[in-house]
């Protein structure tokens, strides 16, 4: 029963807010902008450091429909 209560009290992370801290793959080079693939979707992304295509990235911020990422 306590598991049900905790599950109902937890906030649901959906949409762009649910992307924070998720891991994905750079589908194009990010220098500084490009595309990443996370949760089965392509997203526009920006990085403060160059990221090669195929590298793993972590979402550090969500700015509208653009993700700010860093290499993992």
Image (spheres, rainbow, N blue to C red):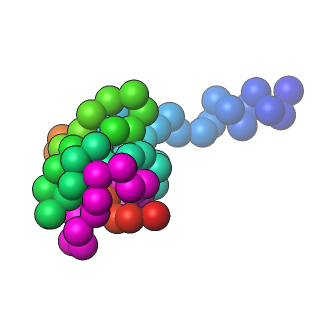
Would residue 22 be visible to someone looking at this image? yes
Q: Relative to residue 18, is residue 37 drawn left or right? A: left
In the rendered view, tell whether residue 21 sits above or below residue 12: below
Q: Please tell me which residue is depicted at 15% across the width and 63% down the height of the picture.
A: 31
Would residue 62 be visible to someone looking at this image? no
In the rendered view, tell whether residue 44 sits above or below residue 40: below
Q: Relative to residue 17, is residue 5 drawn left or right? A: right
The magenta region covers 47-60
Quadrant where the N terminus lies?
A: top right
> Residue 40 location, x and y as percent?
39, 28
Q: Relative to residue 14, is residue 69 drawn left or right? A: left
| The quarter of the displayed image where residue 18 is located | top left
Q: Does 58 lie within the magenta span?
A: yes
Residues 16 and 40: in front is 40
Furthest toward the right, the residue is 1
> Residue 36 location, x and y as percent?
29, 44
Furthest toward the front, the residue is 53
> Residue 61 location, x and y as percent?
30, 58
Q: Does 2 lie within the magenta span?
A: no
> Residue 14 location, x and y as percent?
41, 33
Q: Please tell me which residue is depicted at 41% across the width and 46% down the height of the picture.
A: 24
């Amino acid at each position: 029963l306590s598991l049900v209560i905790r599950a109902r009290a937890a906030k649901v992370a959906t949409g762009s807010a649910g992307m924070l801290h998720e891991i994905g793959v750079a589908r194009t080079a990010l220098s500084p902008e490009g595309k990443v693939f996370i949760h089965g979707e392509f997203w526009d992304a920006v990085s403060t450091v160059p990221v090669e295509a195929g590298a793993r990235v972590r979402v550090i911020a969500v700015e509208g429909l653009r993700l700010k990422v860093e290499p993992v």
